[in-house]
Image (cartoon, rainbow, N blue to C red):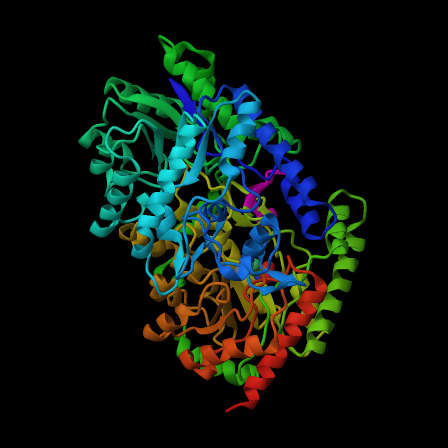
Amino acid sequence: MQTSVIGYPRIGTLRELKFASEKYFKKEITAEELLRTGKALRKIHWNTQKNAGTDYISCNDFSYYDMMLDTAVLFGIIPKRYKELNLSELDTYFAMARGYQGNSGDVRALAMKKWFNTNYHYIVPEVEDDADIRLSGNKLWEEYAEAKALGIETKPVVIGAYTLLKLCRYQRRPLEAYIDAVIRAYQDLLKKCQEYKVAWIQFDEPALVRDMEEEDMALFRKIYDTVLPAGNKSCVLLQTYFGDVRDIYPELIKMPFAGIGLDFVEGKETFDLIEKYGFPQDKLLFAGLINGKNIWKNNYKKTLLTLEALKKKGIRTVLSTSCSLLHVPYTLKQESALSAEYLCHFAFAEEKLAELEELKNLIECKDYHSETAYQNNERLFAGDRDCKNKDVEKRLSLVTDEDYIRLPKRSDRQKLQKKAFALPELPTTTIGSFPQTKDVKANRSAYRRGEISEKEYVEFSRKKIAECVTWQEEIGLDVLVHGEYERNDMVEYFGEALGGFLFTEKAWVQSYGTRCVKPPIIWGDVYREKPITVEWSVYAQSLTKKIMKGMLTGPVTILNWSFPREDISIKESISQIALAIRDEVLDLERNGIRIIQIDEAALREKLPLRKSDWYEEYLDFAIPAFRLTHSGVKPETQIHTHMCYSEFTDIIPAIDDMDADVITFEASRSDLQILDSLKEHNFETEVGPGVYDIHSPRVPSVEEIADALHIMLTKIDREKLWINPDCGLKTRGVSETEASLKNLVAASLQIRGEV
Ligand code: GLN
Ligand code: ZN
């Protein structure tokens, strides 16, 4: 049996690519230096896989920003406004990813969306009406040749035509207008692969795990029946992940792919589909059995049982990861703070390579049951992790239906709150964090390393809070925030303060471009030991007569941005976290904080990819868990929530059901479509659709913001609209933040002056 890796992380064990890119953006290093860093990383990644014994190693899984953007560039899908900047190829690429403001012009970045049910974000390619889609880029072959020169035969990876067509954004001409051009481009791609003597090419088609209508299936057939005519000789691996392909499976297995990659981890029905429809002898099954998304060790017993069952059916199987390893950190070797009793339960990317190899050897043994590797693994899973907490269990069992309901009803609360706060109409606010400047980060890390005392740390943070409050007052914002200087990350910060979490030191995972996150690990039952944010918020409130928002992260987001347990359900973990956050909400209220924001930035993330599973498998417990955090507050206490990315058009009733008083969300980088849907559904919650994009360093003008507000006012009642940026400001610089917020306030004053 052979092994395959769908994709490998690319940011570097110590985030080398991130730091090099950021230096390049600041013009501190040249393009050549950045490219050299990329090349060095690719070499390490390939060699690591080769040395671990991986048989099918990918190339072109590397990216300077995002693989969807790479695919767009590969096929020349570059909007004119970026070409017209007349920048180098690399800078045009970055202009699409991050926007551009400089001597050559001023353009916004392309939209960014979450990659299926992950916390990775892809750049949405934009197909202009006169787009000329054709094979244009060279990256794929350059990387292939680069690996070959190192003596490594790789399989180039590229997003497949179906997923590409499905995820692009179009102008007036719809998707259908581009099918033929896309097919031709992929045909040319295959031709070129043959010229390069590429043995295998991997087309990633995760869009197949979503619900497929008859016309989707027709589209898929049309694409591949043309790209791969019957009798085709190129070894194409059709790779799927993040779920099962139940709609198209019976047809998929009849199509001329040399290999089909299926997900056995998230694909609930994958095995049943094989049982029911079989799997052809002439193809390889790439069985995704090693979880590419979570960090727990593989359960060998279960995996080997599946492999044996496949073997018995005579299926030629390649053991594979369930998805790209992009979603897990590099290696446990960097983790020196966690003791061996914890570490022995985990496998990051490198350790997963070792698992692939170990399993490959075990399945080939006559009797793997007697092998040490197998027995060690079995013992690990049979052991007790010591992660249960009786009090948590008891408290959860006492929660009643009433605990999920806040009274009085929202419309009554909103009236009371309007009176109590007496805010101007169209109130302005921000999402919470302010720029995390070098001194802020240095203060935190000095404290962490024990170089400064707690008193010094607190004093510095208080000084920053005081400056931030003054700053906001000077600019003229209405509802203030304390700036979140004490937080490294909105989830890690809470995880560290809660019982039941474990932390890593270097376990970074790419979220988008140069942004990485370090998700905590939920090890055991979760509970709050003592108040977390209260002192900071109370201090900030003491500095101003304006209202200070308390700032918390909600239970769904804490769970979604952590590595979850695999021994209890997600529902159970979320409920435990909800009770802990509820304690914090009530403590804030008790201490005079009158507006409390509970961020659910990642609410949509684990929404099942198939609609039929949405409620039962997720929303039916995620939404009530949010309500449990705030149902205990007084009517006058205003609850805000915030969501990144406005892609919730289809779950608007569920969002309204969170029963928050106000919601802010991203809207500027995607279009304002969501507003129509809010109106259509009679959305009750007050809303602050972000008026400018904080993921880009560019400063929006007053007119631009005022224009956005005018559009919003045609769809949202004036009494219900808030004015705020897209998201927190922590990743931005001070000067651009100041300029942008000033423009935001100026625009709000302008609009208030208009009737
Ligand atoms: N309150 C957080 C902040 O402002 C929210 C961040 C987020 O939504 N990702 O940073
Ligand atoms: Zn956000």
Front one among 345 and 530: 345
Front one among 297 and 11: 11
Q: Quadrant of the N terminus?
A: top left
Q: Which residues are magenta?
A: 494-510
Please state the horizontal and vertical placement of residue 294, each as a whole percent of the image. Answer: 47, 37
Q: Is residue 410 left or right of residue 534?
A: left
Front one among 333 and 514: 514
Query: Would you say residue 728 is visible in this rendering?
Result: yes
Q: Relative to 130, say whether 231 is above or below.
A: above
Residue extending farthest top: 366
Query: Would you say residue 204 is visible in this rendering?
Result: no
Q: Is residue 626 left or right of residue 742?
A: left
Q: How many marks?
A: 0
Whether residue 189 is in magenta: the answer is no
Front one among 563 and 202: 202
Residue displayed at 52% across by 57% down: 581
Q: Relative to 451, say whether 474 is above or below.
A: below
Q: Quadrant of ligand 1?
A: bottom right
Residue extending farthest bottom: 755
Q: Relative to 489, say whether 58 is above or below.
A: above
Please state the horizontal and vertical placement of residue 300, each as a whole percent of the image. Answer: 40, 23
Q: Quadrant of residue 191?
A: top left
Please state the horizontal and vertical placement of residue 167, each as a whole percent of the image. Answer: 39, 52
Residue displayed at 25% across by 39% down: 225
Please state the horizontal and vertical placement of residue 163, each as a whole percent of the image. Answer: 36, 46
